[in-house]
Amino acid sequence: MKPTVHDIAREAGVSLSTVDRVLNGRSDVRPKNAERVKEAVRKLGYVRDTNAANLAKKRRYNFKVVLPEGANHFVETVAEAVRDAANAEVTDRADVEIVHVNTSDPHAVVKRLKALDLSELDGVAMMVPETPQVRDAIAHIKSAGAYVVALVSDLPNSRCDHFVGIDNFSAGQTAGALLGRFLRRETGSILVTTSSMVARDSIERRHGFDEILLRNHPNLKALPTIEFYDDPDRISETLSHALAAHPDLKAVYSMGSGNAAMLGALTGRTAALGLVVVAHDLTPVTRQALMNGEIDAVIVQNVGHVARSALRVLRAKCDNATIYEAQEQIRIEIILRENLY
């Protein structure tokens, strides 16, 4: 028979209200009594049913998911996955709201984060670049007792409680390995593009990419990263310049999620020039490009898994429950036209 809170109170020699305060992490308990309760919990092997406890208290979780604003197919797929995950979490009594911010302006991000009602907030999952201003805003959120999860792109120098996403260094290594195999007998340059190198995922992918090329494929030279800020005119001009300046160009590696502009600029050029293209994230745009042969491979993370994991981690943090790392690990997948799902 499973031990109950009544058993804990009896074993510790304290009241039920004292047991409740200790189990809920409240500080208004004498240290000696708190230690008695914790010792009773260990001795009896008590495991708290947090779902039942929350249901009994009619507690609802209040979570915000902060995503970049603007036209970005990958962000749209993440937002849809969050909505699906939130609907699936109804029995766990979670209210989930998506908040869009202008991630190109750190001050706008901070202004939006500081506008959140912290008195009602349990946790935030955010996909934003890490800047000093954002780190300060995260510290402000956490000082109010809310938990913060980094989504897709890590925030390692902030006080985030967890990161949900693929290992982006490994993802960059994967891109380097793929292009090395595609271009095994070739010598030449690779154009590397992204929307912005402020994003941590792009920084880590570039490091991983360079590490593999330098170590295993010295016949290939990665050019300096081109940032195009989702601007079709900028990437088109940059690509034309790169093709003229580097006649030995053999491939394009798109590190960021803004693939629509890049693919638009490449239309008609990949086949004519024999360019190999590797990109990230399966969206309607990259899916069609795979089918049309405009992209050779897409490195993917399951956004449904990402969204569900973020909400599970936030709930576990709120309940002081165990996070099962194996369940929350987001794996890297490689999609080709032949295995397109």
Image (cartoon, helix red, strand yellow):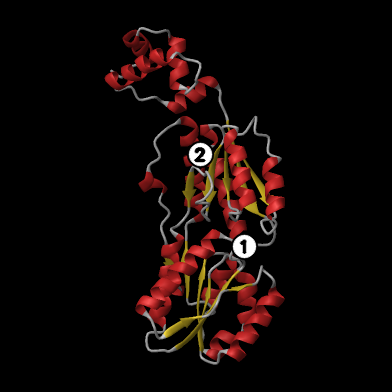
Residue at (67% x, 44% y) in the render: 113
Residue at (52% x, 61% y) in the render: 201
- Determine whether 332 is above or below 52 in the image: below
Image x and y of residue 119, in percent:
65, 30
Image x and y of residue 75, in percent:
61, 57
Image x and y of residue 132, in percent:
61, 51
Label 2: how many residues lie within 10 Å, few (<14), some (14-19) or many (20+)?
many
Dividing the picture into quarters, in which one does residue 269 lie? bottom right
Q: Of helix, strand and loop, which one carries label 2? A: helix
Q: Of helix, strand and loop, which one carries label 1? A: helix
Which comes sooner in the sequence, label 2 or label 1? 1
User: The disc labelled 1 sits on which kind of residue?
Assistant: His
Q: Which of 27 and 192 is in front in this view?
A: 27
Q: Tell me if residue 339 can be seen.
A: no
Q: How many marks?
A: 2
What is the C-alpha distance between the residues marked 2 and 1? 25 Å
Q: Say whether residue 189 is left or right of residue 186.
A: right
Instruction: Residue under label 2, please give it.
Output: 314
